[in-house]
Amino acid sequence: MSTTGIGQAVRRKEDKRFITGAGRYTDDLNRPGQTYAYFLRSPHAHAKINGIDLTEAVAAPGVVSIFTGSDVAADGLGGLICGWTVHSKDGSEMKAGAHPILAEDTVRYVGDHVAMVVAETYAQAKSAAELIVVDYNVLDAAADVGTAQDGSAPQVHAEAPSNTCFDWELGNKPETLAALKNAAHIVKLDLTNNRLIPNAMEPRAAIADYDSGTDEYTLWTTSQNPHVARLVLSAFVGVAPEHKLRVIAPDVGGGFGSKIFIYAEETACTWASAKIKRPIKWTAERSESFLSDAHGRDHVSHAELAVAEDGTFLGLHVQTKANLGAYLSTFASSVPTYLYGTLLSGQYALPAVYVEVDGVFTHTAPVDAYRGAGRPEATYLIERIVETAARELAFDPAELRRKNFIRTFPHQTPVIMNYDIGDYDACLDKALALVDYDGFPARKAEAESRGKKRGIGFSTYIEACGLAPSAAVGSLGAGVGLWESAEVQVAPTGKIEVFTGAHSHGQGHETTFAQLVCERIGVPIDDVEIIHGDTGRVQFGMGTYGSRSGSVGMSALAHALDKIEAKAKKIAAHLMEADAGDIELKDGVFTVAGTDKELAWAELALGAYTAHGFPTSEIEPGLKENAFYDPLNFTFPSGCHICEVEIDPDTGVTQIANFVAVDDFGVIVNPMIVEGQVQGGIAQGIGQALFEAAHYDETGQLITGSFMDYCMPRADDLPDFDLGFTQTDCPSNPMGMKGCGEAGAIASPPAVINAITDALGVRDIKMPATPARVWAALAAPSPSSD
Amino acid sequence: MYQFDYHRAQTVAEAAELLAANDENTLLAGGQTLIPTLKQRLAMPAKLIDIGNIADLNFIKAEGDAITIGAATKHADVAASPDVAKHLPALAHLAAHIGDPAVRNRGTIGGSLANNDPAADYPAAALGLDAKIHTNKRLIDADPYFTGMFETALEDDEIITEVTFPHPEKAAYVKFPNPASRYAMVGVFVAKTPIDIRVAVTGAGANGVFRVKEMEDALSSNWSPDAVTGIKVPEDDLLSDLHGAADYRSHLISVMAGRAVAATM
Ligand SMILES: Cc1cc2nc3c(=O)[nH]c(=O)nc-3n(C[C@H](O)[C@H](O)[C@H](O)COP(=O)(O)OP(=O)(O)OC[C@H]3O[C@@H](n4cnc5c(N)ncnc54)[C@H](O)[C@@H]3O)c2cc1C
């Protein structure tokens, strides 16, 4: 077996440049003659703009040009779009106002774009912006999702009465309501899923360069999906025709979803670079990232679970208010609907599920996909209510779950998803063993003797990755297909270039995709180059999010490699004067069955290009193939996370004493990278559970606008994670892969909160469970604490 | 950042002269507070007078029954000093837990005391140990030095030159860090010096660092954690924010005071 093939912990090829500081991120790039953009942002959550006086600002030193919403409108540019149309219960389309690139007459959140100042230096642009006089008529803001639909709340968009973008439903309503009516027990829970700010290490950035000679635009930007950016900028915003726009996402330092979206800044830079006929560069300051990167989560929910006397789950009814922010971001509407409601059956054989979601506008930054996107919210809800059910009905939390596990596959849930495969008992068993569940009472008693309160919490999660079968998502409202493409180009020397539409912003594609090539062809890994993130080099692609790169992107590569192998064997047959059916390819060598004839991979490649030894009327010269792959189904990673916490009752500080995660990701290409993904995901999930929260005050000011107040998890907050894996190969794609990028962030928050509520003996505690909240819960134990 | 001139001073006298020359001139020490302020365009100094390299301000001296630390001495140097470790381990511990390594290798004791951030650590040690703050003009006792949140007795053109700490019989500092910033949400310095017993609290006071007389009295008759954990500082003068309301801070003061006393035993 190849030491660089599937299943090997190959060191990441890309790390050499990353850890030696030789990575090339957008801000590292500079263009000759480049100018700098600074965006003047609204200091108010909601205001009418009576007028903008640029007189002094345009005269400031170094200013090249200043653009406002009226300039954008005068050019007839479209606004930013949402690529997924969701329908309300009455069948009507979601309601949304326009999303202008630069505000026209109204600003709708603190950080909204009022003007773009372009100058010779960044400092000059920023100084000139201070001279812009904006006459605001400040209005009341609707900052809180819980109250934004009240009659008296200020309106975000006239088009969306009561700030309701949609009231969506999914599932079998009559059966669910009947189950709740007749059940022996009803478990009720009110939950908040706290709002998060993504905080990728690299802030968003863009350089746009217009070539007046060819009318071509090049945009370098921090994108997870450059082809999607090109499509939106050309087809919808109308900045440039698609074939005249090249979008390059060079090294990108983390995204977590926030770099999927097409934002005002890169759009405005691209458009304006043609106006001034010079390149324009913009890099967000960290405080701009806080204000204007799309945020995540922010749900308020009420859930009711119907349970039979013997613990069988009979039905689940969920009502959720999902904050969309002030404008619909690129995929905002899909996150609290089709990526959320569809996962509410969890790992359980629930006969009835009914979910109602109101998508609510508020005067806050747009909310969109963030690591897990909808599935963390679903998992939090179901795993919290199942744990609560176990406590109320006096079941062991592991046993109540086991009693309700789905065990036959495929399994059709009441909420669209058709689970293809899984073994939930195997994950639970392994996790129970790893955590030493039987030893918990002793550990709790020992902690007690040290004055600490110890608790344990479970999360047996399922999620959906591998986004997604195009026809399926199309029927649910997606404006795009979610296939992936790959191209394999073999050079005459046998070196291999792979062009993938997936995009790596930390995931390690340059290594894992190369591992698949090594596995299939048998060439050394250094002979394989993975190229991504450039619409000028990669034919097409839908990018990376939803843990789709392996199951969809590598499946496309597998198909392209099938074609390469088939053609190479045909050529080899001619070169070795044998029958194509007798040719075998192993470890980079072609052999003919039953003979000692051999042909090295590089010799074959050269032969394909010299084209001397085969009939070019039958076989074209060259060795280059591409494939588009559309998945058959979503994939369903699942697993069991168990968390043990110790709480210091004197201070309310929670320490994670033990964290076990057992995941079933199907086939694992590189266990080292997968463990890294799981660890990072759990760190983010623990961040949500214990530390992170975006907090707006009632006027819509972001209180947590810097790391001084927005608390990120740090290494010393986290224990060593105990990781384990089980494996059921995914039958829905040729790789057998399910995806691992989001599981940690999806599974871990309920495990942590279940452990804390267990330790404290309370029904709920809001995330993040800060020391102050834990102390307050201890000081006044009540059914629910703030 | 706005444009400014930069001058690296060689002596305290030179720095003092430049500082007095223009109201808009500002001292720069480690820059760990000032530079972020400049980057956010919240200050527009005419000239930055860098005192970080003045040799007379960079030293740690153990003489007699006191330790004197130059104003431009970095947190990391205080944390690593054998003299401080020997005579005032509580101060070494405090310095070692300020910010992160980058902050500790730039930030200075003089800058911290001049800035008097209500959540900074050094003010608790200065007040808790009855330190003497020497300036280019005079000597100021800790009690009158701290006059309020971000306020001190320093005049506009006054430069801290050094700080003298007595060797205590017992002392300890226990900090409950703000989870996000890791500044003190509550930090309590307790000390028993030959002269008196002091309990100084940082991070919690609406007017900056303060002493808790009731705890000091209790400790003078009974140096034990139990003496202080039952004493509550009234909530009225305490900070309340996203990370902790006044009642929580009040509670933490009692807990941290108890832990600090325990740490001396
Ligand atoms: C990320 C981060 C985390 C931090 N965490 C902590 C923490 O946990 N605890 C804590 O206590 N602090 C913390 N700090 C603050 C840090 O300790 C600073 O170093 C300190 O507050 C200021 O010292 P400085 O030398 O950097 O002063 P500067 O930033 O250079 O100056 C601050 C102010 O003091 C004035 N000044 C400086 N020196 C003198 C002097 N000798 N005489 C008169 N005026 C003077 C300056 O003019 C300026 O107004 C943190 C800072 C950062 C950036």
Image (tube, coloured by chain):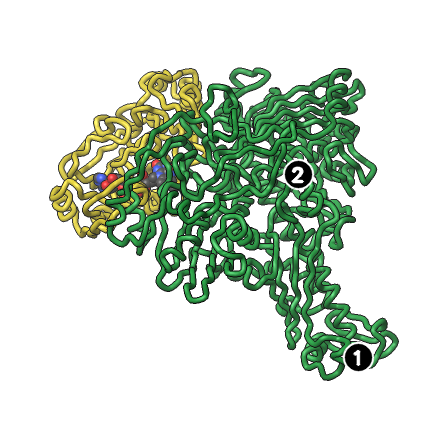
Q: Is residue A238 visible?
A: yes
Residue A94 lies in quadrant: top right
Secondary structure of the residue carrying numbered label 1: helix
Specify the quarter for ligand 1. Answer: top left
Q: CA distance from mark 2 to mark 1?
A: 56 Å
Closest to the observer, A636 or A87: A87
Left or right of residue B239, residue A546 in this image: right
Please identify which colour was used for chain B in the image. Answer: yellow
Residue A609 lies in quadrant: bottom right
2 vs 1, front mark: 1
Instruction: Please tell me whether residue A779 is drawn above or below residue B91 in the rendered image.
Output: above
Which residue position is annotated with label 1?
A: A574
**Letter of the chain that mark 2 sits on in the rendering:** A
Q: Quadrant of the C terminus of chain B?
A: top left
Q: Earlier in the sequence, mark 2 or mark 1?
A: 1
Residue A221 location (% of width, % of height): 48, 54
Q: Residue at x 30, y 44 (%)?
A: A129
Left or right of residue A342, residue B105 in this image: left
Which residue position is annotated with label 2?
A: A660
Q: Is residue B68 visible?
A: no
Secondary structure of the residue carrying numbered label 2: strand
Please identify which colour was used for chain A in the image. Answer: green
Q: Are marks 2 and 1 in contact (CB under 8 Å)?
A: no
Residue A223 location (% of width, % of height): 52, 51
Q: Residue at x 64, y 77 (%)?
A: A493
**Letter of the chain that mark 1 sits on in the rendering:** A
